[in-house]
Amino acid sequence: MMELEVLQTVWPQLHAMGASLVAISPQLARYGRAVRRRTKLEFDVLTDLHLRVAEAFGLAFTLPTDLKELYAAFGNTLDTFHDEPDFR
């Protein structure tokens, strides 16, 4: 979310130069919409369900076991937010 907030701060300047901006997230659409509302983003957040776009660009990966455990210790359930049981 921090990255999205930073992008929002520069969005007016990008837009003034004629640029477009879109975020692509592996989160289920309902979570992406909630993030967009909560952070008051003025650009679109699209959903890459099951990481198809990320895979096409070679960006998808599975978290190693120690990172899965760390995420779980903080209560993060990426499998729920992304519909990916393998924490990809």
Image (cartoon, rainbow, N blue to C red):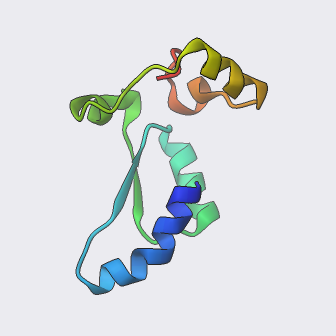
| Residue drawn where x is 37% and y is 83% of the image | 13
Q: Is residue 86 positioned above or below 32 on the image?
A: above
| Residue drawn where x is 60% and y is 64% of the image | 39
Residue 48 horizontal/vertical position (percent): 37, 38
Instruction: Look at the image and tell me in which quarter the N terminus lies.
Output: bottom right
| Residue drawn where x is 33% and y is 78% of the image | 14
| Residue drawn where x is 50% and y is 37% of the image | 28
Task: Residue lying at the far bottom in this picture: please name it.
Answer: 16
Left/right placement of residue 69 relative to residue 45 reads right
* Tally of numbered discs: 0
Q: Quadrant of residue 49?
A: top left
Residue 57 horizontal/vertical position (percent): 23, 35
Residue 75 horizontal/vertical position (percent): 76, 30
Observer-nearest residue: 43 or 63?
A: 63
Left/right placement of residue 45 relative to residue 36 reads left
Observer-nearest residue: 41 or 66?
A: 66
Observer-nearest residue: 46 or 61?
A: 61
Q: Quadrant of residue 54?
A: top left
Residue 51 horizontal/vertical position (percent): 36, 30
